[in-house]
């Protein structure tokens, strides 16, 4: 697996660390363990070294290694400067494989930078190449006009989607977008959702969870979790508070954001003041993934007001914890959240419908609990990571077999 711009073991909630990191960590671990009925693969995940103190090779889990590749400075590099390092990254992966005497059967890339590196390696090694983009530049631009994406990314994604053996999309919606915007045949796209650890993100007593994370017992708690960036629509969420009919004892807790998210956090605090709701808005900063189950359990409702989500892991984590989700009807959220059954899906960009649903849920404990219970059931039925890993393993088998076929035919 290639995960050039961010490591699966990096702290989450930073500007560039979120769902993709969790995906690579969970899937690599389960594939190596033979989870979900797979036979147990050897997985090497390559990432660009951004920290000189880390060992070259570390274990993610038995059978799954994380390899740091020198490409550019061993420090944080801004995303816009990474395309220039793709070539060095691919060369570093190739050199590592040669030095170790490892040959790989398949490359699975994550995000366009890795797909660019994977494209070069797949040609050199003559192996199949599958990629997940996690986000796509043209899709982001459509979701929020103020987004800016470098031309080099847009060009690379339009080219790479045609060269890959398979694009892995998180939802049918993404498969449709790949056809509509990029002209990719649906047969070249496999839809495999992301998942959730059902044991870790499980329902538990709300009052106890609040004590553990230090949230007040008598508040009505709205929680939002994610990378702090404009696409997450947190400005809409803050504005929605001022549209609520009853703001008494309501607290909005926002988790996410490292030091590089300070300008955006500052913008959100300014909006809260402008709306007169600053006393109700708590910007907590990033929290470790292991702390999040208690935050979800402590919440009455989890909000995802995003302008776009290719999947939206936070929604499935919240629902798995037995908490209803009020989300924009965009991207993956439209398939994970079932309107009126596991929460509510509402028009994006509009604060008022969010306010209306918060009022409704806070006035109806019974309804809130029922939605939370059926959310948990739905996650149990369809979104375990073990299912995801089994689908990924089946896809690998298919691609490796298809790749071997033409060569066999020539031999005969
Ligand atoms: N996350 C975390 N700590 C934080 C913020 C986020 O552990 O402070 C995790 C969150 O639990 C989820 C992931 O980061 O697993 C975010 O994934 P999602 O798909 O919702 O958003 P993305 O980052 O992919 O846009």
Image: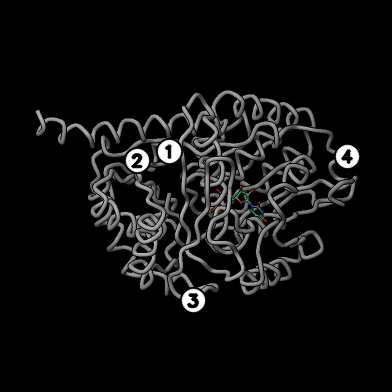
Q: Residue at x 49, y 33 (%)?
A: 388
Give the secondary structure at mark 2. helix
| Gap in angstroms between the C-alphas marked 4 and 1 | 35 Å
Question: Which disc is residue 208 wearing?
Answer: 4
Q: Is residue 210 left or right of residue 183?
A: right
Callout 1 crowding tier (Cα within 10 Å): few <14, some 14–19, many ≥20? many
Please tell me how crowded label 2 is: few (under 14), some (14-19), or many (20+) other residues with Cα within 10 Å.
Answer: many
Task: Kindly report the distance in space between the C-alpha atoms of the residues bearing marks 3 and 4.
Answer: 45 Å
As helix, strand or loop, the secondary structure at mark 4 comes to helix
Taking 297 as reference, is 229 left or right?
left
Q: Nearer the viewer, residue 66 or 224?
A: 66
Quarter the C terminus occupies: top left
Mark before the other along the chain sequence, 2 or 4: 2
Q: Is mark 1 within 8 Å of ligand 1?
A: no
Q: Kindly identify which residue carries mark 3.
A: 73
- Mark linked to residue 171: 1
Compared to 253, does 26 lie above or below? above
Tell me, yes or no, if residue 75 can be seen here.
yes
- Pointers 2 and 1 in contact (CB under 8 A)? yes
Please provide percent x and percent y for residue 196. 60, 37
The first of marks 3 and 4 along the sequence is 3
Disc 4 packing (10 Å; few <14; some 14–19; many ≥20): some
Marks 3 and 4: which is nearer the front?
3
Residue under numbered circle 2? 175
Relative to 48, residue 409 above or below: above
């Amino acid at each position: 697996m290639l995960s050039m711009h961010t490591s699966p073991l990096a702290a989450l909630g930073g500007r560039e660390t979120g769902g993709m990191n969790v995906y690579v960590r969970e899937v690599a671990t389960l594939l190596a363990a033979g989870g979900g009925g797979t036979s147990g693969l050897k997985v090497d995940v390559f990432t660009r070294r951004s920290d000189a103190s880390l060992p070259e090779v570390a274990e993610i889990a038995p059978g799954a290694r994380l390899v740091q590749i020198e490409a550019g400075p061993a420090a944080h590099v801004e995303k816009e400067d990474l395309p220039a390092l793709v070539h060095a990254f691919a060369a570093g992966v190739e050199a590592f494989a040669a030095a170790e005497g490892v040959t790989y059967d398949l490359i699975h890339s994550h995000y366009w930078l890795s797909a660019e590196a994977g494209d070069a390696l797949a040609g050199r090694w003559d192996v199949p190449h599958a990629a997940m983009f996690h986000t796509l530049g043209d899709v982001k631009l459509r979701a929020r006009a103020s987004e800016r994406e470098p031309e080099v990314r847009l060009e690379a994604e339009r080219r790479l989607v045609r060269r890959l053996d398979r694009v892995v999309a998180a939802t049918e919606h993404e498969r449709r977008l790949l056809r509509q915007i990029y002209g990719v045949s649906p047969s070249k796209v496999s839809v495999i959702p992301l998942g959730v650890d059902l044991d870790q993100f499980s329902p538990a007593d709300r009052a106890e969870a609040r004590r553990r994370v230090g949230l007040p017992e008598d508040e009505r708690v709205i929680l939002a979790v994610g990378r702090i960036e404009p696409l997450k629509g947190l400005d809409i969420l803050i504005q929605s508070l001022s549209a609520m009919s009853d703001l008494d004892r309501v607290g909005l807790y926002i988790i996410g954001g490292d030091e590089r998210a300070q300008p955006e956090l500052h913008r959100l605090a300014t909006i809260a003041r402008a709306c007169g709701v600053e006393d109700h808005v708590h910007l907590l900063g990033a929290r470790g993934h292991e702390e999040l189950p208690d935050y979800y359990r402590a919440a009455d409702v989890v909000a995802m007001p995003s302008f776009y989500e290719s999947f939206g892991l936070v929604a499935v984590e919240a629902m798995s914890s037995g908490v209803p989700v009020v989300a924009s009807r965009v991207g993956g959220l439209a398939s994970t959240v079932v309107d009126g059954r596991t929460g509510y899906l509402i028009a994006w960009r509009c604060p008022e419908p969010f306010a209306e649903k918060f009022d409704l849920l806070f006035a109806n404990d019974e309804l809130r609990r029922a939605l939370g219970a059926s959310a948990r059931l739905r996650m149990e039925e369809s979104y375990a990571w073990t299912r995801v890993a089994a689908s990924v393993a089946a896809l690998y088998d298919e691609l490796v077999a298809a790749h071997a076929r033409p060569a066999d035919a020539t031999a005969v």
